Image: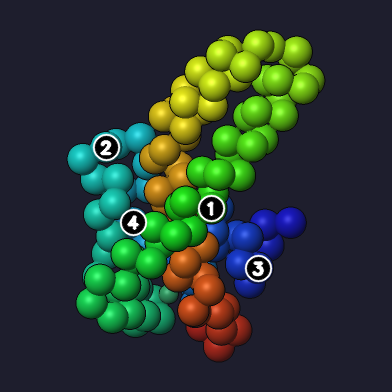
Amino acid sequence: MLKKGSKLNSILTGSCPRCQYESMYLDKNPLHFSKMLKMNEKCSHCDLRYEIEPSFFYGAMYVSYGLNVALSIATFIVSYLILDSSIKTSFIAIVVANILLFPFVLRWARNIYINMFVSFDKKFRK
Ligand SMILES: [Zn+2]
């Protein structure tokens, strides 16, 4: 499922979308908040500039919005329909899930966004 060359591999690992050889981020761990969104300027392996144009990653906000809506709906289904909680408890569960997963959602949004524009290229495979 996570073999090299699939977009899912690049999205979940945060690796370069073109060569998938190295991480796009300075710190691989998204829980280090001070370095959460700090990225390398370009890939040292395939020379891809990550910020394709100025303010490129502002577009990831839309992806982030979609991910948060999907997360909220999934949390609501689990909390309200499966665990049979009240509406108030389900709302609290949605807020908690969004707060706890925000570092991952931010990175996944960026990873999905750059993978919409850059595809894997076999010639950079090592
Ligand atoms: Zn690369």
Callout 4: few (<14), some (14-19), or many (20+) C-alpha neighbours within 10 Å? many
Q: Position of residue 43 (x, y in %)?
A: 35, 73
State yes or no: Cβ of the residue under disc 4 lies below 8 Å from any atom of ligand 1.
no
Q: Position of residue 68 (x, y in %)?
A: 51, 43
Q: Are marks 3 and 2 in contact (CB under 8 Å)?
A: no
Is residue 79 found left or right of 94 in the rendered image? Answer: right
Q: Nearer the viewer, mark 3 or mark 1?
A: 1
Q: Nearer the viewer, mark 4 or mark 1?
A: 1
Distance (Cα) linking label 3 and label 2:
28 Å
Along the polypeptide, which appears first: circle 1 or circle 2?
2
Callout 3: few (<14), some (14-19), or many (20+) C-alpha neighbours within 10 Å? some
For image coordinates 23% across by 77% down, the residue present is: 54
Q: Nearer the viewer, mark 1 or mark 2?
A: 1
The label on residue 6 is 3
Give the quadrant of ligand 1. Answer: bottom left
Distance (Cα) linking label 3 and label 4:
19 Å
Along the polypeptide, which appears first: circle 4 or circle 1?
4
Name the residue that disc number 2 marks: 33
Looking at this view, name the residue that lies furthest to the front: 87
Question: In front here: 64 or 119?
Answer: 64
Q: Is residue 4 visible?
A: no
Q: Position of residue 113 (x, y in %)?
A: 47, 66
Three-letter amino acid code of the residue under disc 2: Phe
Q: Are marks 3 and 4 in contact (CB under 8 Å)?
A: no
The label on residue 81 is none
Along the polypeptide, which appears first: circle 3 or circle 4?
3
Q: Is residue 82 visible?
A: yes
Name the residue that disc number 4 marks: 25
Indicate how the structure is coloured in the image. rainbow
